[in-house]
Image: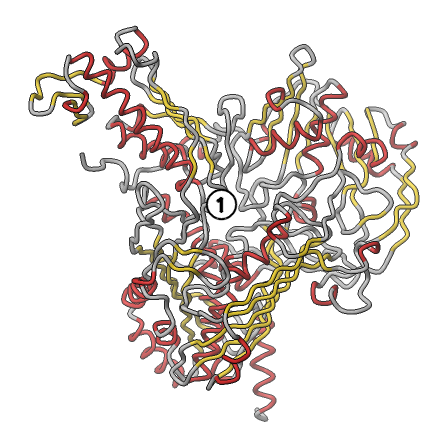
Amino acid sequence: MAAQYVGAPVPRREDPRLITGQDAYVADVELPNALHLAVARSPFAHAEIRRIDAVAARGLPGVVAVLTGADLNPHLGTIDMIIPVEEFDQVNVQGRQALAQERVRYVGEPVAVVVADTPWVAVDGLGALAIEYAPLPAVTDAEAALAPGAPLVYPHLATNVAVRWSRAVGDVDAAFARATVVVEARLSNQRVLAAAVEPRGLAASYDAASEQLTLWASTQAPHWLRDWVAEHLGMAADRVRVIAPRVGGGFGSKIALYSEDLIVAYLAKNLKRPVRWVATRREDLQATSHGRDMVAHLRLAADRSGRIQALDARVIGNLGWCLFSDGPFLPVLAGQMVTGCYDIRTARVEVLGAFTNTMGTAAYRGAGRPEAAYFIERMLNILAAKLDVDPAEVRRRNFIPPEAFPYQAPMGPHYDSGNYRAALEAVLARADYAGLRAEQARARRAGRLPGIGLSCYVEMCGFVDEEVSDVIVGPDARVTVLTGASPHGQGHETSFAQLVADELQLPLDRIAVVHSDTTLVRKGTGTFGSRSIARGGMAAVANARRVRDKARRIAAHLLEAMADDVVLEGGVFQVRGVPDRRVTWAEVAGAAVGGKLPADLEPGLEAREDFVGQGLLFPFGAHLAVVEVDPETGVVELTRYVTVDDSGLIVNPLLAAGQVHGGVAQGIGQALYEAVTYDEAGQLLSGSLMDYALPKAADLPGFETGHTVTPSPRTALGVKGIGESATIGSTPAIANAVLDALAPFGVEHLDLPLTPEKIWRAIRARRRAEGQ
């Protein structure tokens, strides 16, 4: 039977409760008699802790406890990164403690906590703490950290090199020696942050009678958090329950285990009262993981036609003060994906991750892949300018051809499928690229500065093959899907229900999707890395098919027919060719629990098998941006944005469009506005939303979205992820557009973000050079 729901633009079932304020977030969780946590954070980027005097703070009325690293760290152990050391050629493993002892290494590092009856008393307690520091030299830039004589974040290591990875394929030096054209550039991907609408937050309650700890957390990975908390507190995992109520965004920043997670859980257990903590926006900007912050030194060798002969790259990632969560792997991932959509057979990449006195970097929407796309897409435009060839044509000449798939990329990834030229041609046609170029020529003659930017990207997604989505049919034929792919805005309650409804041929309103509770859902990995539909969704499909097969056998038993002769048509089971011999889902479901079963079947109608994916998936696409630059002010107006993304089968076009729109908005933010900035002493200069510029709705144009469909051979329905695609494609497209606009002034490159001041200074410098 043809799909009824998959592929249909079904409105999100979650939205009515969200937009009417009926759903709860962590801050809404009511816990009578709860204590409140406040965190004392380092005001220095690098300093020795000489003394902590908590006497006055402990004496304040309403203060229940004041704890330092000496009090807590022995009970909580060391927090390690979540990436296996085997992923690196070299790694200097440095775990972190819940509270700093002896030395602090970034502004915002937790040093002590105050627990009080009210949040206001807890903050007063922070003010009563007397902490004496001895400041030390700090380093905040990764390249500076790797230079001789740089201040050492960990003196005992005698280096700031945190991780190292390298790979080479082919004779790179020989390829450059014989190349007709060589282009090189230093390209940076500035530090940014997730800035989720909801900051991190936690609430915990411990029941001594049942020895059960319940933790409400704004997290992307409830089951991982449960396991981590249980391990660090010395508890059995089934004694810890993690509930993620509605989560107001994460974008990768809510995967990690943070100090506050362990401290809140530990205090609730040991003080025998509920404890809660919700980050202020300043805390969120200081001490929630940052993203990006990579520099690449790149060279491309090409022949006279622009066909790339070799790539040579050195990628340097700023990891911050420690090996934080998945952060150490992200520069490696950027290095692995740096050849992008292009058939580059000879390549050499070296990756270094550096310790600095800044907040740790970790996944931020796209996580290594936006950096890689930016690096290679800027280099393609630089090559096109050098050859005086249209940027679209340079890309055509270098794409991996469709017949080459599956394709082994030189740095390791094994691409499953692709038709990159089809996506490029689709976006060019949709945008009327020839018309845009003609209009640009006319506008330039009139003294205006329009720019057109292209970007073609390939994404790697589906990280962590394992996921759980149990499918259970009740006696009333209502279906419950219990998934470990816990959402934070993606719409799983809609898309997963669409998948299962089609597999079982049931109305959508008979499918309920349950998630984000480790007691209700037995296992799970979480939502990140564009994995949910390809892992959790396909887990639901696989178990729905198992349920359907069992239901067909029960129906055959009820109909006294052979199972092979029974088909599911129009939501009822019938004997093939004899439609009058039929039973409904309700009759089958009732028989499953009522004893009317074949002897070889167990009671119940459910499937609870774990799902294991068949390898990583590689969505791709092409984006086109049109801008106009004001030559007198440097202000960029983004006048048009066109996307063509390929994520295989689209389960829900409305949800896909939402992901693309949001992803482009964040890409615009990185291209034009956003930057986490530290001064030389390591003080955070972008510590509020007055100083950290985010794009506003008024800054965004209407988005024109389209898709090509190249099914993945590695998933049951050919699906791939789409959650991060637009963030990967958008930043380089906008950067290329702005620099295309500035081409008449001879501006070849500017570092992100492309702010009005930066653009104005570049124009002014050129005018001065020309004596204007």
Q: How is the image coloured?
A: secondary structure
Q: Is 687 in front, or is 496?
A: 496
* Residue at figure coordinates x 58%, y 79% from the top left: 762
Question: In screen coordinates, is 295 left or right of 50?
Answer: left
Q: Position of residue 641 (x, y in %)?
A: 39, 62
* Residue at figure coordinates x 26%, y 32% from the top left: 502
Residue 2 found in image quarter: top left
Badge 1 element? loop
| Residue for badge 1 | 463
Residue with the most extreme top position:
595
* Residue at figure coordinates x 61%, y 78% from the top left: 761
Q: Give the quarter of the figure containing the C terminus.
A: bottom right
Q: What is the number of callouts on the image? A: 1
Residue with the most extreme bottom position:
771
Q: Position of residue 68 (x, y in %)?
A: 84, 35
Q: Amino acid at mark 1?
A: Phe
Q: Position of residue 525 (x, y in %)?
A: 51, 35
Q: Is 725 in front, or is 56?
A: 725
Q: Give the quarter of the figure containing the N terminus.
A: top left
Q: Position of residue 85 (x, y in %)?
A: 64, 48
**Residue 106 position (above or below residue 27):** below
Q: Residues within 10 Å of mark 1 (few under 14, many from 20)?
A: some
Q: Is 118 in front, or is 12?
A: 12
Question: In screen coordinates, is 557 left or right of 704?
Answer: left
